[in-house]
Image (cartoon, rainbow, N blue to C red):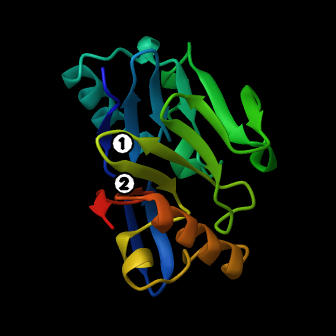
Amino acid sequence: MEIRLDILAVGSLIKENDEIKEAHSTSTLIRTENMTIVVDTSSKYLKPAIKSSLKQLKVLPEDVDVVVLTHSHHDHVENNDMFKKAKFYIREEEAAEGCASVSKDMEICKGVKLVHTPGHTKGSMSVFVNADRKYVITGDAVPLEDNIRKMVPPGLHYDKEEAMKSIKTIMAYADMIVPGHGFPFTV
């Protein structure tokens, strides 16, 4: 079996006068020969969409082996309780109870690598996937397609230079980007 990616729920970001009014992250399913992985569990608002997608894909929440959290903001982690049997990964800078801390870039299975992509937060990480093409599931290292098209850092960031360096790292690898708050797009 080759590695398969499916979007469980497409995230969104609603702004008014540059202020975020509503945020829901994209949630992605990765299936490999030996592992079922969810990247970001999104917000409570998108829980019905995630449940429906899992059902259509014939994946039960208890079938999920690993959950990768790109960072700890609420709109990326509110449905963690759905995946009771999964091992959770988050960067050590974001340390969260019940999660394994990731301190360096690591492959969690063949073709799926966790990569530190700071800028939005100190502990932001992305998931680099080598499947039918090279995907990067970015969390908020690239929240929107516009961040790539306009080459601008996330609106919310702690370090603009780090954010831009992470965007360049992502672009150097990716054929397809799954942003933190929107539809996948080709680079």
Q: Secondary structure at mark 2?
A: loop
Query: Residue 46 shows which numbered tag?
Result: 1
81 vs 48: above or below: above
Which of the two marks, 2 or 1, is nearer to us in this view?
Answer: 2
The residue at 24%/16% (across/down) is 58
The residue at 32%/43% (across/down) is 9
How far across and how far down the image is residue 151, in percent?
Answer: 47, 83
Q: Quadrant of residue 105?
A: top right
How far across and how far down the image is residue 68, in percent?
Answer: 57, 36
The alpha-carbon separation of the residues under discs 2 and 1 comes to 8 Å
187 vs 131: above or below: below
Name the quarter where the N terminus is drawn. Answer: top left
What kind of residue is marked 1?
Answer: Leu
165 vs 176: above or below: below
Query: Residue 118 shows which numbered tag?
Result: none
Name the quarter where the C terminus is drawn. Answer: bottom left
37 vs 90: above or below: above
Query: Is residue 157 visible from the viewing direction of this image?
Result: no
Of labels 2 and 1, earlier in sequence is 2
Query: Residue 11 shows which numbered tag?
Result: 2
- Mark 1 nearby-residue class (10 Å; few <14, some 14–19, many ≥20): many
**Label 2 with label 1: CB-CB less than 8 Å:** yes
Q: Residue furthest left?
A: 56
Query: Is residue 69 visible from the viewing direction of this image?
Result: yes
The residue at 40%/42% (across/down) is 27
Q: Which is nearer the eye, 74 or 34?
A: 34
How far across and how far down the image is residue 170, in percent?
Answer: 51, 62
The residue at 48%/84% (across/down) is 18
Q: Which is nearer the eye, 172 or 30?
A: 172
Left or right, 153 with respect to 22, comes to: right
